[in-house]
Amino acid sequence: KSFFESNSEIYGKNILITGANSGLGFSLLNLLRGNNNILALTKENQSNIADLNDHKIELFNFNFELNEFNNELKEKILNFKPNIVINSAAVFGPEKQSIYDTNHEEFSKIFSINVFSAIEIIKICLKSNSLNQIINISSDMGSINLNKEGNYYYYRLSKTLLNSFTKNLSIDLKNKINTYCIHPGSMKTKLNSGGILNSEYSAIKIINIIAKNQIQNNGRFIDINENNLDW
């Protein structure tokens, strides 16, 4: 079965994607836009999305670090009536992340982008009463059990918190909305120059998971092959 056959299963959905102007977020947007309506929330340069000249893509500039959820954004999301939300926006943080390098200001910045913005966006989306899937893009670096190397406090802790939030929310929603975390693999992006996977490959695998919308994924932390990862 080719990618295009599997991707065609996601059709006529309203999909909100954060961090949609680069890396995995842009690959997801580019692959999903053909058959769906996209609301793309991005912070920085949007020229690559604008260059697509696709009327089914709505762009909204949002500062994830400041978490500025004004009425315009809330109304935009509510009127869009998202069926699927994919929180892909993330930063890795500074190169040096030992315990001695950490400070409250940097923690606050990274947590706002990687976790708190996702929480607030989901809260707004839930009010639309249109959601059937919530996908939070996480990382195996957020796994407590898989952590054998330490270091990278900002990034690890932010993804651990995102995982914990996702699990908790999946319980509260009582299987009514499929809610789960996906580790996209070691992708070669601006966050990870040493990655081995192309972001489009990871996006294809993630789309195939979303297309199936299997409720047994609810409350799970999985990789792109749908294997369970340790929390």
Image: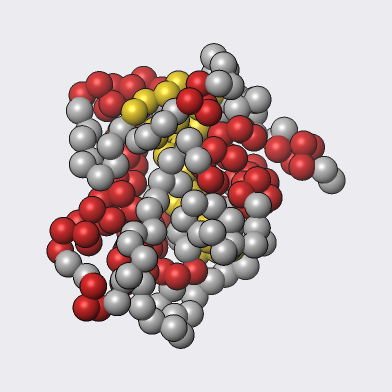
| Quadrant hosting residue 121 | top left
**83 w.r.t. 88: above or below:** above
Q: Is residue 170 visible?
A: yes
State the count of labels.
0
Viewer-side residue, 225 vs 60: 60
Q: Determine whether, in the image, residue 34 is placed left or right of residue 181.
A: right
Q: x, y (%) of residue 116?
A: 26, 50
Q: Residue at x 34, y 28 (%)?
A: 61
Q: Residue at x 23, y 53 (%)?
A: 109
Q: x, y (%) of residue 9?
A: 70, 35
Residue sitting farthest toward the left = 104
Q: Residue at x 65, y 25 (%)?
A: 34
Viewer-side residue, 198 vs 88: 198
Q: Determine whether, in the image, residue 217 is placed left or right of residue 79.
A: right
Residue sitting farthest toward the right = 1
| Quadrant hosting residue 144 | bottom left
Q: Is residue 83 visible?
A: no
**191 w.r.t. 42: above or below:** below
Q: Residue at x 43, y 41 (%)?
A: 19
Q: Point out the image quarter for the C terminus.
A: bottom left
Q: Determine whether, in the image, residue 217 is placed left or right of residue 95.
A: right
Q: x, y (%) of residue 96?
A: 32, 70
Q: x, y (%) of residue 134?
A: 45, 46
